[in-house]
C-alpha cells in the first residue's frame, strides 16, 4: 500500500514510463499506415491509367470496378489510422497528466490554470492567504480543463459551505480517491481541448440548433434525400451495362442534386457552423462522461450531479459521428462527389435534426456534469497525493483544535507543524516574536487550512476539529496609486470592512498581521489596542500577530479574553536559529538589532 508522498511519486514515474512505451508502439503503427495510404494512392493512379488506356465496354467496366477497390480500402485504412491517432493522442495526454503530478510533487508549477483570473483584493481573505494566482492553493489543487470545472473550484475556495454540504463533499472526495486510478484517464480525455469550444457547442445545443434545423421537417425533402443514394447507385450500375442515354439521366440527376444543395446552402451552413472539426472533442468528452456513468456512486453529493439515469455519453458519441460525416464537406473534391450523388450535407442536417429533437437538452446537461466531476477530482487528487493529510471534523459548536497543523504550500521536508487550540469561549490571541520567526506563516497556515476544510477537502494536519467561521484577514495591505490610496488609508478601509463584518456575523474569525504599519508607533499602538478591545467586546476570536510587545500586556487587563503566544529565536554563537514553533506567553527575544548589525547598521 502506498502511504507516503514519495510512494506516490514513484508510482507516477512508473506510470509515465508505461505511457512512453505505449506511445512509441502506437506511433510505429500510425507511421506504417501512412505508408499504406501512399501505396494505395499509387495503385489508384495505376488503375486510372489502365481505365484511360483501355478499349471496349468490358475492359472499361473491369477497370472502373478496380478503380473503386483502392478507394474503399483507403477509406478503411483512414478509419483505422484515425482510431490509432486518437489512441496516440490520448496516451500523450495521459503521459502529460502523470508528468504533471510528478512535477507538482517535486514542488514545481502546475500545468493547469493557477486561478489568477479569480484574484480579488477586496475579498475577506483571498489575497492574504494565497488562494489564487501563482504558487497558490488553487494552483496546487486545480485539475480542471473545463469552464465549469475551474469556476466551481474557485467558488468552493472563496466561500464556505454549510456543515451538511461540507460533510457530503468529504464523502464524495473520499469516494473518488478510491477510484483515483481511473480519474487519470478521465482527465486525459479532457486535456488539450479549447475551453471556449465546448462552451460554444453547449450554447448551440441549448438554443440555436432547434431553430436552425426546422427546414429538415419537410417530408418531401426527407423522402428524396433518403432515396437519392439508391437511385444514383442504380443509375450508375445500369449506365455501366447499357451506357448511352442512361448516363445523361445520371448527369441530370447529379446536377439536380447540386442545385438542391445550393438552394439550402444557407440553412446547411447555419446548422454546421459551430460544429466544424469538433468531432474529436465531442468523442473525448463522451468518453469522459461515459466514465461517470459506468460506476454506481454511493456518496450523496456525486449522485446529485446526475439529473437522470440516461446514458448521455451514447448520445454524444452519436453526435460526434454525425459531425465526422458532416466534416467531409471540408474537402472540396469530396464535397462535390458526396453532394452531387448522395445529397450528403442535407442528409447530415436531417440526422442532426432528428438527434436534436430527442436529446439536445440532455446532452448539454451531461457536458456540464464533466465540470462538476473535475472539481471534485481535483480535491480527490490532492487527497491521494498527500496521504498523511486528514479530513477535519466540522463542529456545530464553537471550536478550533488542530494537531500538527502545517502550511500546505510548503514542501514536506521544509514544513514545520504546530498544534493550536482555542478556548471554549472566543479570545484574542496576541502573537509576538522576532522577524522571520514564523508569525505570518502561522496565521496563513491556520487560515488556508480553514479554507480547505470548508471546501470539504483534507487539511494539512494530523487532526483538526473546527466550526464554520466567517474568515476575515488583514495581512498584505498595499497602497494604490491609481485610486490615490495611501497605505494608511488602505489599512483603514480594511479595518472598516472587518469591523462591519464582525458586527454582522457572529461566527467571524479574524487574522491580523502587524496592524497599522502606515503610521507612527504611538498611533499604531493606540489604534491596535482600541481595535483589540473592540473585538473583545464583540466576542470575536482573533489571531493578532505583532512586533509591539506592549500589546501583550493586555492579557493582564483582560485575563480571560486575551492570550499570549510567541515565536522566538535561539542564538548559537553569532548565528540565529529558528524552530518556527509557537509557544505560550509573550516573546522575550528579538532579532532586529542583530539583523541591522549584519548589514552594517550597528
Image (cartoon, rainbow, N blue to C red):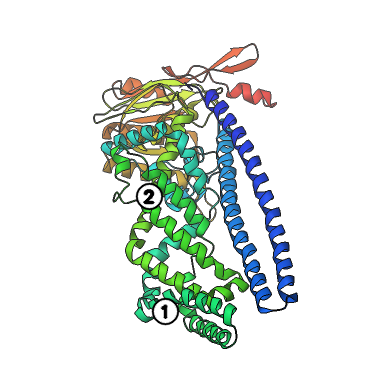
The answer to whether residue 203 is above or below residue 500 is: below
Front position among marks 2 and 1: 1
In the picture, the quarter occupied by the C terminus is top right
Q: Residues within 10 Å of mark 2 (few under 14, many from 20)?
A: many
Q: Residue at x 59, y 83 (%)?
A: 243
Given residues 486 and 421, the one toward you in this image is: 421
The answer to whether residue 30 is above or below residue 464 is: below
Q: What number is the disc on residue 224?
A: 1
List x then y, in percent, for residue 400: 33, 26
Q: What number is the disc on residue 257?
A: none
Gap in Å between the C-alphas at discs 2 and 1? 39 Å
Q: Earlier in the sequence, mark 2 or mark 1?
A: 1
Given residues 47 and 469, the one toward you in this image is: 47
The answer to whether any part of residue 158 appears in the image is: no
Task: Please identify the residue farthest to the left as the structure is shown.
Answer: 397
List x then y, in percent, for residue 285: 46, 51
Relative to residue 349, is residue 578 drawn left or right? right
Given residues 38 and 448, the one toward you in this image is: 38
- Residue 302: image quadrant is top left
Question: In this figure, which residue is indicated by the disc labeled 2?
Answer: 369
- Residue 20: image quadrant is top right
The answer to whether residue 546 is above or below residue 27 is: above
Q: Is label 1 in a helix, a strand or a loop?
A: helix
Q: Is label 2 in a helix, a strand or a loop?
A: helix
Relative to residue 349, is residue 247 drawn left or right? right
Number of numbered discs on residues: 2
The answer to whether any part of residue 174 appears in the image is: yes
List x then y, in percent, for residue 549: 45, 24
Given residues 456 and 546, the one toward you in this image is: 456
Relative to residue 538, is residue 5 drawn left or right? right
Task: Please identify the residue farthest to the top as the structure is shown.
Answer: 573
Amino acid at each position: 500500500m502506498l502511504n507516503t508522498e514519495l510512494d506516490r511519486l514513484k508510482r507516477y514515474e512508473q506510470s509515465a514510463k508505461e505511457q512512453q512505451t505505449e506511445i512509441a508502439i502506437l506511433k510505429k503503427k500510425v507511421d506504417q499506415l501512412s505508408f499504406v495510404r501512399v501505396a494505395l494512392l499509387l495503385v489508384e493512379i495505376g488503375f486510372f491509367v489502365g481505365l484511360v488506356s483501355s478499349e471496349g465496354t468490358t475492359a472499361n467496366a473491369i477497370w472502373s470496378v478496380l478503380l473503386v477497390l483502392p478507394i474503399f480500402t483507403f477509406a478503411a485504412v483512414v478509419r483505422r489510422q484515425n482510431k490509432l491517432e486518437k489512441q496516440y493522442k490520448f496516451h500523450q495526454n495521459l503521459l502529460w497528466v502523470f508528468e504533471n503530478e510528478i512535477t507538482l510533487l517535486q514542488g514545481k508549477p502546475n500545468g493547469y490554470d493557477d486561478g489568477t483570473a479569480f484574484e480579488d483584493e477586496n475579498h475577506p481573505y483571498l489575497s492574504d492567504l494565497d488562494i489564487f494566482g501563482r504558487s497558490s492553493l488553487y494552483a496546487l489543487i486545480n485539475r480542471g480543463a473545463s469552464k465549469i470545472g475551474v469556476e466551481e473550484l474557485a467558488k468552493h475556495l472563496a466561500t464556505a459551505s454549510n456543515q451538511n454540504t461540507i460533510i457530503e463533499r468529504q464523502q464524495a472526495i473520499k469516494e473518488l480517491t478510491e477510484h483515483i486510478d481511473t480519474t487519470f484517464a478521465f482527465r486525459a480525455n479532457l486535456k488539450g481541448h479549447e475551453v471556449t469550444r465546448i462552451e460554444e457547442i453547449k450554447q448551440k445545443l441549448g438554443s440555436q440548433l432547434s431553430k436552425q434545423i426546422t427546414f429538415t421537417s419537410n417530408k418531401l425533402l426527407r423522402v428524396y434525400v433518403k432515396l437519392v443514394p439508391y437511385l444514383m447507385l442504380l443509375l450508375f450500375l445500369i449506365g455501366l451495362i447499357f451506357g448511352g442515354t442512361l448516363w445523361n439521366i445520371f448527369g441530370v440527376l447529379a446536377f439536380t442534386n447540386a442545385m438542391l444543395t445550393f438552394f439550402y446552402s444557407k440553412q446547411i451552413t447555419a446548422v454546421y457552423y459551430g460544429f466544424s472539426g469538433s468531432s474529436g472533442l465531442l468523442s473525448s468528452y463522451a468518453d469522459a462522461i461515459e466514465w461517470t456513468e459506468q460506476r454506481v456512486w454511493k456518496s450523496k453529493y456525486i449522485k446529485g450531479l446526475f439529473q437522470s439515469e440516461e446514458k448521455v455519453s451514447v448520445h454524444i458519441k452519436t453526435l460526434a459521428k454525425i459531425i465526422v460525416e458532416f466534416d467531409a464537406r471540408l474537402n472540396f473534391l469530396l464535397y462535390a462527389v458526396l453532394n452531387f450523388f448522395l445529397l450528403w450535407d442535407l442528409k447530415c442536417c436531417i440526422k442532426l435534426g432528428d438527434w436534436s429533437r430527442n436529446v439536445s437538452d440532455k446532452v448539454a446537461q451531461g457536458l456540464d456534469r464533466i465540470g462538476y466531476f473535475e472539481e471534485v477530482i481535483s480535491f480527490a487528487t490532492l487527497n491521494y497525493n498527500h496521504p498523511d493529510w486528514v479530513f477535519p471534523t466540522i463542529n456545530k459548536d464553537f471550536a478550533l483544535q488542530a494537531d500538527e497543523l502545517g502550511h500546505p504550500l510548503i514542501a514536506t521536508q521544509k514544513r514545520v507543524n504546530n498544534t493550536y487550540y482555542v478556548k471554549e469561549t472566543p479570545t484574542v490571541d496576541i502573537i509576538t516574536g522576532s522577524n522571520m520567526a514564523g508569525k505570518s506563516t502561522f496565521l496563513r497556515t491556520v487560515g488556508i487550512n480553514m479554507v480547505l476544510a470548508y471546501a470539504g477537502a483534507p487539511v494539512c494536519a494530523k487532526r483538526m476539529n473546527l466550526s464554520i467561521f466567517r474568515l476575515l484577514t488583514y495581512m498584505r495591505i498595499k497602497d494604490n496609486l491609481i485610486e490615490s490610496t495611501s497605505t494608511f488609508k488602505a489599512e483603514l478601509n480594511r479595518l472598516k470592512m472587518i469591523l462591519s463584518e464582525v458586527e454582522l456575523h457572529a461566527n467571524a474569525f479574524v487574522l491580523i498581521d502587524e496592524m497599522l504599519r502606515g503610521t507612527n508607533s504611538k498611533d499604531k499602538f493606540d489604534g491596535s489596542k482600541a481595535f483589540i478591545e473592540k473585538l473583545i467586546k464583540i466576542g470575536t476570536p482573533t489571531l493578532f500577530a505583532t512586533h509591539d510587545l506592549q500589546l501583550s500586556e493586555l492579557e493582564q487587563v483582560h485575563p480571560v479574553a486575551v492570550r499570549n503566544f510567541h515565536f522566538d529565536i535561539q542564538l548559537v554563537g553569532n548565528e540565529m536559529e529558528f524552530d518556527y514553533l509557537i509557544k505560550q506567553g509573550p516573546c522575550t527575544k528579538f532579532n532586529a538589532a542583530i539583523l541591522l548589525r549584519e548589514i552594517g547598521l550597528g
